[in-house]
């Protein structure tokens, strides 16, 4: 975080000073900038690269950086782009209908907060929890493999497909998928996009858990589909409401997260698991099982239930998972598993959209999961997430009781909390950011009107318990300003 701050600060200083130089004039050397601003050569290099990307400077290898020549001529008047409102609307017999793609829920997770802000909004592991050295070694070894830079099979490397199949089948016996049933994708979001496009046409209803992952809602709406909510409780999706929604809408697709559901953390109860698959089978519907959190079980999770796909010989379940969450945001390697004619459609859409996942990434993934460091990494993350989770939950209960979590899951990245009645969500989120802590608003997790104001508070993107304590202290300050009077008090925060 300090390095990122230094780069931004140095780029800002140089941006203000650039007018002192004539177009084409050489800027001070990197060594001079290092000595003058007391920063590292890497910081100087990155700051100059940022200015070069903006068009303010031109860098010449071996010669230095120069103020860019003006682009010449008067600044042209802005054009009239109002015609695009019609072109971007969906055309119907009655005329154009406004259409938009809302990525706000996804961007809330992907956006890096400003320097110095505690990140309770993150959706990935903190860099200290990522296996950076192991990944670097895996990528280097993968790049030296014979044929590593050649075109891979469009379905993915057979060895990687077989590994995912074994992981999905687990202890599910002979009913689980095989390597032939697996398609390698560019991460979980890509797999979800492919599955929804394959299974539901534009305009079709798609049943979703409520609340649910905003990225899935964004994918469905971008495809012109209509998300329909099915409530979840402490034991996950309610099968009787799922069956009722199928009858009422005629939907043929359900998207669910049976394990450590995002955002509630619920695990689908044992007695409900077979019932959900049975209801879908009888209705002739597919279940898209987003198994994003299986590798994110905490140290005290105990034995995990097998995936729905592990005992599904009839091809009701389309299963997806990814290596991204448990490793690095940039290792975008995931998998889709399905049986029957639907696989041909999944394969076709995947090829049209992406051709294939880059072979070096697939080879690196194989190196990673096949190394002795892989099980050690899984154990280390499980051990690191548990105290972070407990520390955040205890801090909220003690110091910000108005935001105490309803449940504390034994897996995943976050806690789901409900704010007091009368809370303005936007005011609370804004107050938190001004206090120096980034939180995720709950509204984007609902495809219909939310029953109350919620926040998703993550702990995996933090550096550790000390940072969580500081984040809770700042959140307490924000709540004192933004919550209805008399609802935000708790004990004073101590380290």
Image: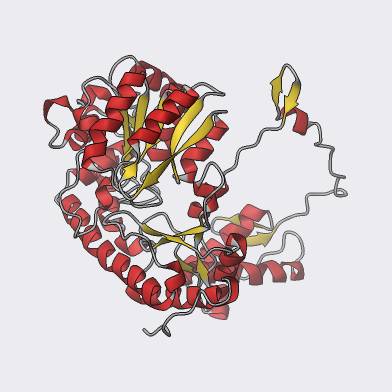
Query: Residue at left 19%, top 60%?
Result: 300
Q: Measuring 12% from the left and 26% from the top, which residue is drawn there?
A: 174
In percent of width and height, residue 460 lies at: 35, 61
Q: Is residue 482 left or right of residue 207?
A: right
- Of the 4 image quadrants, the one containing the C terminus is bottom left
Q: Is residue 255 above or below residue 56?
A: above
Q: Is residue 307 visible?
A: no
Return the x and y of residue 323 as percentages of the image width and height. Answer: 31, 44
In percent of width and height, residue 307 lies at 23, 37
Within the image, what quadrant is residue 342 found in? top left
Q: Is residue 490 left or right of residue 423?
A: left
Query: Looking at the picture, does residue 472 appear above or below residue 426?
Result: below
Q: Position of residue 34 (x, y in %)?
A: 53, 75
Q: Nearer the viewer, residue 140 or 330?
A: 330
Residue sitting nearer the eye, 198 or 49: 198
Q: Which residue: 16% across, 53% down?
A: 302
The answer, for residue 345, to whether it is visible in the render is yes
Q: Residue furthest top?
A: 341
Q: Nearer the viewer, residue 176 or 332?
A: 176
Q: How many marks?
A: 0
């Amino acid at each position: 975080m300090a390095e990122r701050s230094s780069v931004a600060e140095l780029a800002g200083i140089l941006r203000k000073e650039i007018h002192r130089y004539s177009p084409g004039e050489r800027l001070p050397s990197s060594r001079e900038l290092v000595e003058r601003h007391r920063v590292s050569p890497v910081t100087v290099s990155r700051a100059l690269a940022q200015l070069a990307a903006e068009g303010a400077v031109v860098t010449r290898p071996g010669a230095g950086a120069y103020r860019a020549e003006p682009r010449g001529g008067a600044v042209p008047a802005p054009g009239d782009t109002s015609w695009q409102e019609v072109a971007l609307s969906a055309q119907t017999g009655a005329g154009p209908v406004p259409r938009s793609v809302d990525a706000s829920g996804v961007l809330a997770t992907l956006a890096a907060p400003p320097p110095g802000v505690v990140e309770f909004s993150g959706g990935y592991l903190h860099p200290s929890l990522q296996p950076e050295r192991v990944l670097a070694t895996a990528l280097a070894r993968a790049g030296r493999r014979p044929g590593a830079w050649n075109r891979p099979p469009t379905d993915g490397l057979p060895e990687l497909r077989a590994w995912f199949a074994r992981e999905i089948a687990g202890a599910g016996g002979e009913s689980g998928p095989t390597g032939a049933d697996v398609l390698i994708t560019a991460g979980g979001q890509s797999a979800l996009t492919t599955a929804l496009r394959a299974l539901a046409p534009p305009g079709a209803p798609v049943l979703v858990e409520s609340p649910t992952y905003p990225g899935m809602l964004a994918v469905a709406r971008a495809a012109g589909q209509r998300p329909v909510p099915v409530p979840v409780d402490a034991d996950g999706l309610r099968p009787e409401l799922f069956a009722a929604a199928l009858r009422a809408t005629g939907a043929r697709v359900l998207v669910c997260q049976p394990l450590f559901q995002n955002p509630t953390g619920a695990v689908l109860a044992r007695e409900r698991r077979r019932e959900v698959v049975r209801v879908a089978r009888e209705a002739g519907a597919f279940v898209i099982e987003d198994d994003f959190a299986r590798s994110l079980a905490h140290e005290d999770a105990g034995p995990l239930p097998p995936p729905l796909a592990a005992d599904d010989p009839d091809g009701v379940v389309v299963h997806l998972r990814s290596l991204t969450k448990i490793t690095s945001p940039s290792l975008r390697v995931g998998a889709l598993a399905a049986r029957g004619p639907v696989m041909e459609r999944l394969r076709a859409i995947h090829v049209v959209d992406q051709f294939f996942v880059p072979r070096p990434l697939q080879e690196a993934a194989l190196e990673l999961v096949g190394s002795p460091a892989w099980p050690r990494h899984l154990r280390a993350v499980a051990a690191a997430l548990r105290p972070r989770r407990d520390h955040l939950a205890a801090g909220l209960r003690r110091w910000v009781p108005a935001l105490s979590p309803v449940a504390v899951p034994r897996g995943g990245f976050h806690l789901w909390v409900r704010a007091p009645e009368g809370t303005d969500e936007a005011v609370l989120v804004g107050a938190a950011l001004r206090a120096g802590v980034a939180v995720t608003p709950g509204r984007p997790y609902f495809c219909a009107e939310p029953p109350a104001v919620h926040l998703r508070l993550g702990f995996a993107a933090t550096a550790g318990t000390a940072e969580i304590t500081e984040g809770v202290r700042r959140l307490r300050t924000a709540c004192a300003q933004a919550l209805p009077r008399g609802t935000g008090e708790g004990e004073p925060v101590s380290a």
